[in-house]
Amino acid sequence: MLRYLDRLVETVVGALVALTTIAVCLNVFYRYVLGSGLVWADEVPGFLLVWIAFLGAYLAARQEGHIAFDMLVESFPPLLRRGIQVIGDLAVIGFFVLLGLKSWQMIDRVGGRSIETLPIAQGVFMSVLPIASALMVVALSARLIQRWRNV
C-alpha cells in the first residue's frame, strides 16, 4: 500500500515540476518576446516549489535519504542503537503532528484570502503543510514498524 502512495506522490511531484517549468517558460516568452510578463507566473511557481519540496521530503524519508549524523549511534550496541533511533523517530513524528495541527489552524484563519495575483485561496497552497505532515508521520511510522520487525 505504501508503494502506491509513494507512486502517487512521485506523480504529483512530477506534475508540479512540469507545471512550474511551463509557467516559468511562459513568463520568459511573454516578457522577452511579447514585451509584457505574466504577473502570476512569478508568484505561482514559488508556491509550487514549496509543494515540491515538502512532498519531496516525504519521498526522501521513505527512501531514508535525509541527512543523518549516525556515526556515533552506529557505534552503540544494537539494542541501545535501536532505542535511540526509536526515540528520535518518535520526536520527529511528534514534531510533524504538531506542525500538521498548527498548519490547519493557520489555514483556518488566513487560508480563505486570495493570493495577490490570482483569485486562488492561499489555503490551496498552504494545504501542503498538513498533507506533508501526515505523509511524514506515515513514513516515519512505517520506519518504526520496520525497526521493530528487524529485532
Image: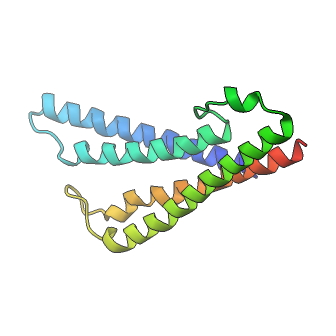
Which quarter of the picture shows residue 61? top right
Check the image and report above or below for 49 versus 101: above
Give percent across and percent down for residue 27: 22, 37
Give percent across and percent down for residue 67: 58, 32
Pick the quarter of the image with the C terminus: top right
Q: Nearer the viewer, residue 32 or 86?
A: 86
Q: Is residue 83 left or right of residue 121?
A: right
Residue occupying image coordinates x 60% and y 51%: 92
Q: How is the image coloured?
A: rainbow
Q: Is residue 143 left or right of residue 131?
A: right
Q: Nearer the viewer, residue 109 or 94?
A: 94
Q: Nearer the viewer, residue 105 or 115?
A: 105
Which quarter of the picture shows residue 49? top left
- Decide if residue 148 is in sight here: yes
Check the image and report above or below for 70 versus 47: above
Q: Is residue 84 left or right of residue 47?
A: right
Residue occupying image coordinates x 24% and y 43%: 41
Give percent across and percent down for residue 3: 73, 45
Looking at the image, the residue that sits furthest to the left is: 35
